[in-house]
Image (spheres, helix red, strand yellow):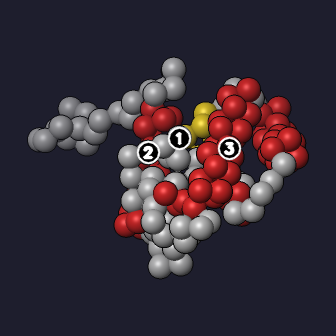
């Protein structure tokens, strides 16, 4: 699982260069047969926590980063977890006191999105349920 590019998106970036850097990170993983899983960044720019003079540019860069990451991940046969468009992505209550990173609630939202995305993959097996009430551990 890879989360990358957030610091790159705080400033202007060249999409081709960033895609190349992400590909250099992700392609070797995919080549080993690993399932590449990436996660989008929450929508900090639209949370109200970013000064208004910086929010529009940041929003455009984060949108572009998310689209670029999703496209590359899918091209490599991986799964991109779209938390960038999650209904809580711009909720200021999911951000830590530093106003950049997720807090415990934000991490819970991300984990739930990851779990849901992986559970939807074809061939995913639901976890076995334990013995019901009154069942013995020996199966009898």
Q: Label 2 vs label 3: CA separation?
A: 16 Å
Q: Quadrant of the rendered structure where residue 136 is? A: top left
- 44 or 83: nearer the viewer: 44
Along the viewing direction, whichever of 26 and 122 lies nearer the viewer: 26
Q: Is residue 3 visible?
A: no
Identify the residue under disc 3. 64
* 131 versus 109 height, above or below: above
> Residue 64, position in %: x, y?
68, 43
**Residue at the far bottom in the pictured view:** 97
- Secondary structure beneath dot 1 equals loop
Q: Residues within 10 Å of mark 2 (few under 14, many from 20)?
A: some
Under circle 2, the secondary element is loop
Relative placement, left or right, of 50 versus 104 is right
| Residue 85 in the image: above or below residue 74 | below
Q: Earlier in the sequence, mark 2 or mark 3?
A: 3
- Pinpoint residue 140: horizontal percent, then vertical percent: 20, 32
| Residue position for label 1 | 82
Residue 77 visible at all: yes
Q: Residue at x 25, y 33 (%)?
A: 139
Left or right of 11 on screen, residue 38: left
Instruction: Name the residue that disc number 2 marks.
Output: 86
- Are the residues tagged 2 and 1 within 8 Å (C-beta)? yes
| Front: mark 3 or 1 | 3
């Amino acid at each position: 699982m890879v989360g990358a590019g957030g610091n790159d998106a705080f400033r202007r970036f060249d999409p081709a260069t960033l895609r190349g850097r992400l590909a250099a990170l992700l392609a070797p993983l995919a080549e080993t047969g690993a399932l590449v899983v990436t996660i989008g960044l929450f929508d900090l720019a639209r949370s109200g926590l970013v000064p208004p003079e910086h929010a529009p540019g940041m929003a455009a860069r984060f949108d572009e980063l998310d689209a670029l990451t999703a496209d590359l991940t899918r091209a490599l046969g991986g799964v991109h977890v779209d938390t960038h468009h999650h209904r809580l992505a711009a909720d200021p209550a999911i951000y830590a006191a530093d106003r950049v990173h997720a807090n415990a609630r934000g991490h819970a939202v991300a984990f739930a999105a990851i779990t849901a995305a992986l559970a939807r993959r074809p061939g995913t097996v639901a976890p076995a349920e334990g013995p019901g009430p009154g069942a013995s551990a020996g199966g009898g």
